[in-house]
Structure formats: structure tokens, C-alpha cells
Image (cartoon, rainbow, N blue to C red):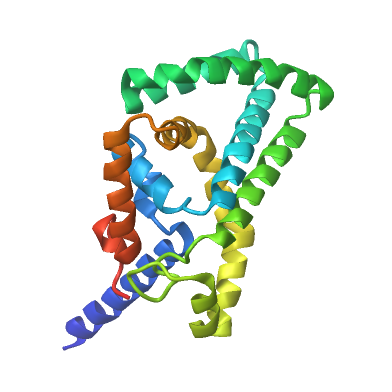
């Protein structure tokens, strides 16, 4: 009986920690399945449905990444080497289509050196600029539907619905996460989602229509029930 009680307490504690993990990371697998190009595209499209959110990321992601390249200039050939490593990883995930990132990375390296000179080679300042842009990206998600598990269900809900049905303590938790945790996730995600944004723009421009149709279907499915896209704890 005592063993059963300990097992029950352990299971409850494990479920609470798992729930906290999902509250903090929203989609933990988005930060581990980094070599799954299709999954990364699905997650990006689901969480960037509003024009303001999309534009904020299209503007701020380059700011984050160019600032990081500027920080890398303190090392010999740091920025070009970082860009080359990034391109290699992009090709590993996205295939040869990631070669479209070559001009993007080349221009970014070109901007990184003047930025580093303007900042006096200050790495902390470069990181501060990158973090500020990541924070702006976080704020832009306020225009998006609220995802599970914060929504209190397996579907995405409107912000208005969330505010009316959520206890004050949980609202405070979301404010805390938005200020301290989510910007870090945006910061970490910015380098790896860059080629995903290129695919996003291509689909918006009418290119890759089959992929665009498939992605639109997946977005609607996941918005109605996020379990169709990734694992979730019991809600």
C-alpha cells in the first residue's frame, strides 16, 4: 500500500512537471525535432496566422540573426564561418533548396561587419539588440490564437475568450512566461527558422502550390485539435 502511494505521488509530480514543461515551451518537440523540415513548417505556419505576427517575424528574425553574426565578428572569420555552418545545417534539414539562403546569408554577413563596427565590437550590445528583436517577436504573438495548454483545451482559442475564462493567477503566469521565457525561445528559434520563412514566402507568392495546399489543411487541423500536430499532456 505504501509503495502504491509513493508511486501515485511520483506519477502526480511527474505530470505536474510535464505540464510545466508544456506551459514553458508550448511545443517542446519544436525545439528537439529541429531536423524535421515538415514539422518545423507546420509549427511555424500554425503560430504565425496573423499578418502582424508574420511581418514582425519577417522583420525581426533578420535583426536577430544579423546581430548574432555581428557578435561573431570578434572571432577571426567569425561571421562568414558562422554563416557557412548555418548554411550546412540548413541544407541538412531542407535539402538543396536551402541554397536559396546563400544570398540571404551573404547580405547578412555584409551588414554584420558595419553593425559590429558601429557597436564598437561590443558582443553584449549585439546580443541585447538580438534579444530586443526576439522580445518584439514575442509581443507579436499577442495577435495569435492562444495555444494549448494555455487555452485550457486541446484547441486554439481567441485572446478574448482566453481572458474571459482564465483565472488571474494563470494570466499572471502567462505574463511572466511572455516576459522571461518566450523571448528566449524566439531568440533560440530565429537562426533555424530562417529557411522556413523563405518557404513561407514562396508559398505566399504562389510557388510550391501543392505544399501550400497541404500546409493550409494541416494548419486548420492543428488549430482545431493540437493533438493532430504534436503530443500534449492531459488537459
Residue at the (50%, 41%) spot, across then down: 189
* 7 left or right of 168 in image: left
Give the vertical position of 190 relative to 69 (above or below). Answer: below
Of residues 109 and 60, the one nearer the viewer is 60
Residue at the (26%, 43%) spot, across then down: 214
Give the vertical position of 168 relative to 107 (above or below). Answer: below
Give the vertical position of 107 relative to 207 (above or below). Answer: above
Task: Identify the image quadrant of residue 234.
Answer: bottom left
* 152 left or right of 105 in image: left
Can residue 143 be seen here? The reply is yes
Give the vertical position of 21 relative to 94 (above or below). Answer: below
* 45 left or right of 36 in image: right
Q: Position of residue 61 (x, y in %)?
A: 59, 37
Of residues 108 and 54, the one nearer the viewer is 54
Q: Position of residue 105 (x, y in %)?
A: 55, 19
Farthest residue in the front direction?
206
Can residue 88 be seen here? The reply is no
Q: Position of residue 17 (x, y in %)?
A: 39, 68
Residue at the (55%, 20%) spot, across then down: 104
Residue at the (26%, 62%) spot, across then down: 227
Q: Position of residue 76 (x, y in %)?
A: 65, 11
Farthest residue in the bottom direction?
1
Task: Identify the image quadrant of residue 15.
Answer: bottom left
Name the quarter where the N terminus is drawn: bottom left
Amino acid at each position: 500500500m505504501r509503495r502504491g502511494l509513493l508511486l501515485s505521488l511520483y506519477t502526480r509530480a511527474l505530470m505536474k512537471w510535464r505540464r510545466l514543461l508544456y506551459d514553458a515551451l508550448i511545443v517542446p518537440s519544436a525545439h528537439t525535432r529541429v531536423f524535421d523540415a515538415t514539422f518545423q513548417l507546420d509549427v511555424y505556419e500554425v503560430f504565425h496566422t496573423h499578418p502582424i505576427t508574420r511581418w514582425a517575424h519577417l522583420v525581426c528574425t533578420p535583426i536577430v540573426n544579423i546581430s548574432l553574426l555581428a557578435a561573431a565578428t570578434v572571432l577571426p572569420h567569425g561571421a562568414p564561418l558562422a554563416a557557412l555552418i548555418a548554411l550546412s545545417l540548413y541544407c541538412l534539414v531542407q535539402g538543396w533548396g536551402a541554397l536559396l539562403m546563400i544570398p540571404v546569408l551573404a547580405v547578412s554577413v555584409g551588414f554584420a561587419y558595419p553593425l559590429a563596427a558601429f557597436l564598437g565590437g561590443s558582443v553584449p550590445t549585439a546580443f541585447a539588440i538580438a534579444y530586443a528583436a526576439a522580445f518584439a517577436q514575442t509581443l507579436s504573438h499577442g495577435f495569435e490564437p492562444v495555444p494549448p495548454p494555455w487555452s485550457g483545451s486541446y484547441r486554439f482559442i481567441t485572446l478574448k475568450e482566453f481572458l474571459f475564462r482564465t483565472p488571474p493567477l494563470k494570466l499572471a503566469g502567462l505574463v511572466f512566461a511572455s516576459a522571461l521565457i518566450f523571448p528566449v525561445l524566439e531568440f533560440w528559434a530565429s537562426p533555424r527558422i530562417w529557411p522556413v520563412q523563405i518557404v513561407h514566402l514562396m508559398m505566399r507568392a504562389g510557388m510550391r502550390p501543392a505544399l501550400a495546399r497541404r500546409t493550409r489543411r494541416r494548419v486548420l487541423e492543428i488549430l482545431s485539435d493540437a493533438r493532430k500536430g504534436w503530443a500534449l499532456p492531459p488537459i
